[in-house]
Amino acid sequence: MSARLPAMFQRLVWSNLAAQSAEQLALAAAPIVAVLALGAGEAAAGILQAAQTLPFLIMSIPAGVLADRMSRVRLMAGAETLRVLSLLAVLALIVSGTLNLPLLAVLGFIAATGTVAYSVTAPAVVPALVAPEALPRANGRIELARTSAFAAGPALGGALVGWIGGAPAFAIAAAFSAGAVALLFGIAEPQRSPKPPQHPLHDLREGAAFVFGHPLLRPIFVTQFIFNTALFVIQGIYVPYAIHALGLSAAGVGLTLAALGVGMVLGALVSARVMRALPLGTVIAIGPVCGVVAALVMALTIWLPFGALAALSFFLMGAGPILWVVSTTTLRQTVTPEELLGRASAINSVAYGARPLGAAIGALIGGVFGAEACLIVAAAGFLLQAGIILWSPVPRLADVPGAAATL
């Protein structure tokens, strides 16, 4: 039986669960408040969504540079405190009746900046708290916390706003976020050697040169970027497609989308066991290949318009790619020198910046050629990302390579 993970790592897991729950609650509550309380239309709701996701594109790299220059636990605590303050500001504006859309968007951007800094830094802390051989299990535990919040948070956020209003929803999110900060104070991060002063651009070039020059990390980044683009081509048009082409009700749309979270949780639960049973390269390849199958199943709904097929597609899109996240995170933590972990994690997070790009592509193609064309284009994108990773050296890995110091 495997040894118990260290107590300080367990605190990190619980902090991560609290932080992710706060994020998902706020992300769900903000657009509902915007529509119901502030009268936002489609364009305003789109701007709000952009404000809440833009930090993933523009703040990941600065956060990674900071993570390699200062105490990572302290950076996470500061980032989460920033989110607490932004959520409390929204709460105060709702209670005082002075909330408006520009303020909600600005505070959403500030909260998301805290989210990015926390999310970029957390994977860089894990190798300092657990032994190398425990990394797959530790990363699986982190992903289980994240995916549990991802699966439950949106539904809970919507229910809270509907039942008791926006103010209590943001109050609960702020309480979760404050709990995440409190849990971090019990983590004693090992001391790192101080870095000599140098220009931030030098730090950035150093991190980018390592990731994009590494024969394993480079194809992983490219694959992930294309995967996220193709996924959000589907996500951008799915709701109107599901209602008009598949004949689903609002509840039916919610159920099919919930299958994504269910798949993510299941994948996180079995990830460590799968990584023990299969070669590392095979586990990494499962995610992209599963993405192809999921995209083809979704495309099949063009001819067989059944909601069950859409739900199966989203389930596969959650279960397989979570194995990718756990296995590639373990690989990146192992092959990256300790002093570059923050920047390597940040560059990986930049791949999530492809999501607005995918949504924009979906909107353009869907507006001109229809949602069915988007599903075909997305399937082509998934085939491309699978081809890139399968032609790389990654699938031939039998196990995690030697530690970065030996490279």
Image (cartoon, helix red, strand yellow):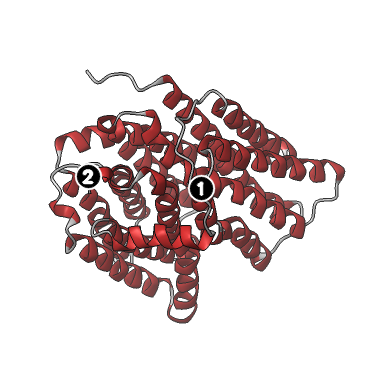
55 relative to 291 in the view: left or right: right
Q: What's under tag 2, amino acid-wise?
A: Thr
154 relative to 378 in the view: left or right? right
- Return the residue nearer the eye: 177 or 371: 177
On the image, the x and y values in percent for residue 2 come to 24, 21
Q: Quadrant of residue 172?
A: top right
SS label for mark 1? helix
The image shows residue 402, relative to residue 303, as above or below, that is above
Which comes before the other along the chain, label 1 or label 2?
1
* Residue 372 position (above or below residue 127): below
User: Where residue 402 sits: x, y (%)?
Assistant: 20, 42
Residue highlighted by disc 2: 406
Which amino acid lies under the numbered mark 1 shown in the image of this protein?
Ala
The furthest residue to the bottom: 368
Residue nearer the viewer, 232 or 56: 56
Any part of residue 305 in sight: no
Q: Circle 1 is placed at which residue position?
A: 251
